[in-house]
Image: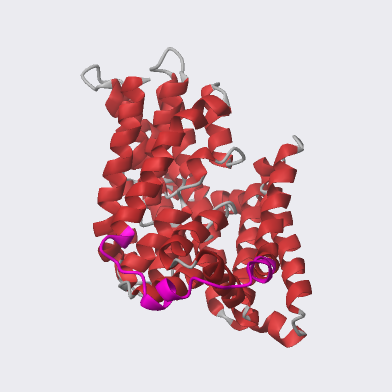
């Protein structure tokens, strides 16, 4: 009685439910509904369409009590607070101007800083570099969609070779391969990512004459000091993350590394900026912070409900088809999962679980191809928080950014395939 009674709406097959839910997601994104509302509403719709009614509150309860979810949500709130304080205190301007005086090239500054800030692996972290990129690319007179592309793409160039990346660590653990063996194969891929990003982002873009002429004398020592003071909250945050990850106590698995590091970063920013209590709490009046935090929770809820809805079974049916090429399984399945879930770790976990029963074992080359396929699918996903937040920050539609992202994706993906076949 109970099973039939409570399965009111969950009558659709998993594939149909997922298609309907993500059509709904696409409409919500197109209508520019708050991302926190969008992700949570999509998760709930998918639950109503595919699960027993009693499973939905169970999944909400499970997600809300999950330590990793709590840590990431709090870390997201902290990083948003930190990024807002960077702007409120003017430290972000000091950081940008000091680096500009040292490097004297807005193209390099716009590409280097998002990559540096990319060391901080938190959902929506591209918002931290967005003000800097906006300031520097404003000098180059780039269109908003190209500004968004530069910020998004260069932020994500570091992760395929970042040894304390949680996604890389998860990939190595699940495939039972070593981390260095995967990273070595990603180095050429990262080189291509940087090259393609620079060519597409700054092709035929002239350096302002003021930068060409400003080159001669500047107090390098003073500029370096200003840069390191302004950059110290981010730098120390990164160092704390790395140190906690290297302790071996399992901090990354529960998200405590980023949470603790973000709190340290906030304290350092308070010290160097000597801000007042009024300035400190002012960002809390901005509802955007809460929207982003709610979106982080929604991403976890959506992932958990997708898992309960049986998305892996859809791909397992494809995987058991003998006519399906192994290359397609190693590329299309992870890329689709990364794209659909907007989560590289979720895409990796599901992909490996699907392929475990098909492949006799995972070699470094198969592990690397699964990783980069998932990662690239995630980078261009409309559910990718960095992508959506960046697009919102620069006030440009996702579609306009895709005209730069798609060729970048194809060039990088082709490089990954070439590495797979050659080595």
**Spot occupied by residue 109 in the image (x, y as percentages of width and height):** 48, 63
State the residue at coordinates (35%, 27%). 419
> How many dots with numbers?
0
State the residue at coordinates (71%, 80%). 280
Vertical side of 180 occupied by 338: above or below? below
**Spot occupied by residue 30 in the image (x, y as percentages of width and height):** 29, 68
**Spot occupied by residue 39 in the image (x, y as percentages of width and height):** 44, 60
Vertical side of 204 occupied by 342: above or below? above
**Spot occupied by residue 219 in the image (x, y as percentages of width and height):** 63, 72
> For residue 279, what is the image quadrant?
bottom right
Which residue is situated farthest in the top direction here? 360
Vertical side of 39 occupied by 168: above or below? above
Magenta run includes residue 285:
no
Q: Nearer the viewer, residue 222 or 304?
A: 222
Q: How is the image coloured?
A: secondary structure
Vertical side of 340 occupied by 78: above or below? below
Which residue is situated farthest in the front direction here? 216
Horizontal side of residue 132 vs 334, given as left or right:
right
Q: Is residue 194 visible?
A: yes
Horizontal side of residue 288 vs 251, given as left or right:
left
Q: Nearer the viewer, residue 155 or 282?
A: 155
State the residue at coordinates (54%, 22%). 177
Which residue is situated farthest in the left direction here? 323
> For residue 206, what is the image quadrant?
bottom left
Location of the C terminus (image quadrant): top left
Q: Is residue 340 visible?
A: no
Magenta run includes residue 223:
yes
Magenta region, residue range:
201-225
């Amino acid at each position: 009685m109970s099973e039939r009674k409570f399965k009111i709406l969950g009558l659709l097959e998993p594939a149909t439910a997922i298609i309907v839910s993500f059509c709904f997601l696409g409409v919500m994104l197109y209508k520019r509904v708050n991302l926190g509302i969008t992700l949570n509403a999509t998760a709930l719709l998918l639950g109503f369409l595919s699960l027993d009614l009693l499973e939905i509150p169970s999944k909400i309860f499970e997600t809300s009590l999950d330590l990793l979810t709590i840590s990431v949500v709090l870390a997201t709130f902290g990083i948003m607070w930190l990024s807002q304080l960077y702007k409120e205190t003017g430290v972000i301007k000091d950081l940008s101007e000091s680096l500009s005086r040292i490097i004297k090239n807005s193209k390099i500054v716009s590409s280097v800083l998002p990559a540096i800030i990319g060391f901080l692996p938190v959902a929506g972290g591209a918002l931290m570099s967005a003000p800097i990129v906006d300031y520097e690319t404003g000098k180059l007179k780039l269109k908003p969609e190209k500004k968004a592309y530069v910020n998004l793409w260069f932020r994500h160039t570091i992760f395929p070779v970042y040894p304390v990346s949680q996604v890389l660590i998860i990939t190595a653990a699940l495939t039972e391969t070593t981390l260095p063996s995967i990273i070595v194969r990603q180095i050429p891929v990262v080189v291509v990512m940087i090259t393609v990003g620079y060519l597409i982002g700054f092709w035929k873009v002239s350096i302002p004459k003021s930068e060409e002429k400003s080159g001669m004398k500047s107090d390098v020592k003073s500029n370096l000091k200003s840069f390191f003071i302004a950059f110290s909250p981010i730098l120390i945050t990164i160092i704390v993350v790395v140190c906690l990850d290297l302790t071996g106590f399992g901090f990354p698995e529960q998200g405590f590394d980023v949470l603790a590091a973000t709190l340290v970063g906030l304290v350092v920013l308070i010290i160097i900026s000597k801000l007042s209590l009024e300035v400190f709490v002012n960002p809390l009046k901005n509802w955007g912070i809460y929207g982003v935090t709610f979106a982080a929770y929604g991403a976890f809820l959506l992932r958990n409900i997708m898992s309960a809805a049986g998305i892996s079974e859809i791909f397992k049916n494809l995987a058991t088809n003998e006519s399906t090429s192994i290359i397609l399984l190693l590329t299309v399945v992870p890329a689709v999962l990364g794209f659909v879930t907007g989560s590289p770790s979720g895409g990796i976990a599901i992909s490996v679980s699907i392929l475990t029963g098909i492949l006799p074992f995972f070699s470094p080359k198969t592990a690397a191809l699964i990783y980069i396929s998932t990662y690239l699918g995630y980078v261009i996903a409309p559910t990718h928080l960095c992508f959506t937040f960046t697009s919102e920050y620069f006030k440009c539609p996702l579609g306009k950014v895709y005209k730069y992202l798609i060729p970048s994706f194809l060039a990088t993906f082709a490089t990954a395939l070439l590495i797979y076949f050659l080595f």
